[in-house]
Image (cartoon, rainbow, N blue to C red):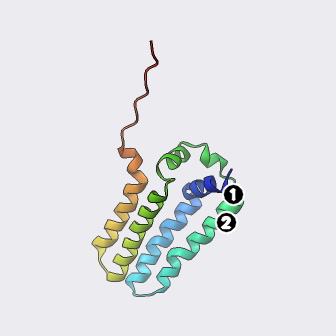
């Protein structure tokens, strides 16, 4: 598996998803408390887990899964990465400003990017020529 593929499939590993979710909301909570340690919580654990998973974990079964196919088709672009990062930045800003609706908007933006492929109709298969 290439490094580029590992960068895609590590994102759907359950440990990575769990760390991102827990530390993301933990960071928002810490920023709400006006603790700048929230910035470290937002990025350090997730980065360390990403590096470990990419370096040490066999991601072939995730690549072969239906979730892997979905990730390859809908989450593998740089624009998708930046939009999800933008949603997270909005969440962090909402935490610092103590605005629940901004946190919610950022979170919904992330959810929309993750689920956006579910909203697009499947492409119809072309009929073979007669």
State the residue at coordinates (61%, 65%): 50
Mark 2 Cα-neighbour bin, 10 Å: few <14, some 14–19, many ≥20: few
Q: Residue furthest right?
A: 56
Image side of residue 126 versus residue 99, left or right: right
State the residue at coordinates (41%, 62%): 83
- Residue 121 position, x and y percent, is 36, 38
- Residue 8 position, x and y percent, is 57, 55
Above/below status of 117 relative to 91 = above
Badge 1 marks a residue whose secondary structure is loop
Image side of residue 81 versus residue 46, left or right: left
Question: What's the mark number on residue 92?
Answer: none
What is the count of numbered marks?
A: 2
Q: Earlier in the sequence, mark 2 or mark 1?
A: 2
Quarter assignment of residue 80: bottom left
Badge 2 marks a residue whose secondary structure is helix
- Residue 125 position, x and y percent, is 43, 27
Q: Residue furthest front?
A: 129
Mark 1 Cα-neighbour bin, 10 Å: few <14, some 14–19, many ≥20: few
Residue tagged 1 = 57
- In the image shown, does 86 or 53 lie closer to the viewer? 86
Residue tagged 2 = 52
State the residue at coordinates (34%, 71%): 103
Alpha-carbon distance for marks 2 and 1? Answer: 7 Å
- Confirm or deny contact between disc 2 and disc 1 (CB under 8 A): yes
State the residue at coordinates (49%, 46%): 73
Quadrant the C terminus occupies: top left
């Amino acid at each position: 598996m290439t490094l580029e593929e590992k960068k895609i499939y590590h994102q759907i590993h359950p440990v990575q998803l769990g760390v991102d979710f827990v530390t993301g909301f933990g960071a928002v909570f810490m920023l709400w408390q006006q603790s700048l340690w929230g910035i470290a919580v937002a990025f350090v654990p997730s980065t360390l887990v990403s590096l470990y998973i990419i370096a040490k974990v066999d991601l072939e079964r995730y690549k072969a899964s239906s979730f892997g196919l979905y990730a390859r088709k809908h989450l593998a672009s740089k624009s998708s990465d930046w939009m999800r990062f933008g949603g997270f930045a909005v969440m962090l800003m909402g935490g610092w400003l103590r605005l629940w609706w901004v946190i919610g908007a950022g979170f919904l933006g992330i959810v929309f990017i993750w689920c956006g492929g579910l909203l697009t109709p499947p492409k119809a298969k072309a009929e073979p020529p007669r």
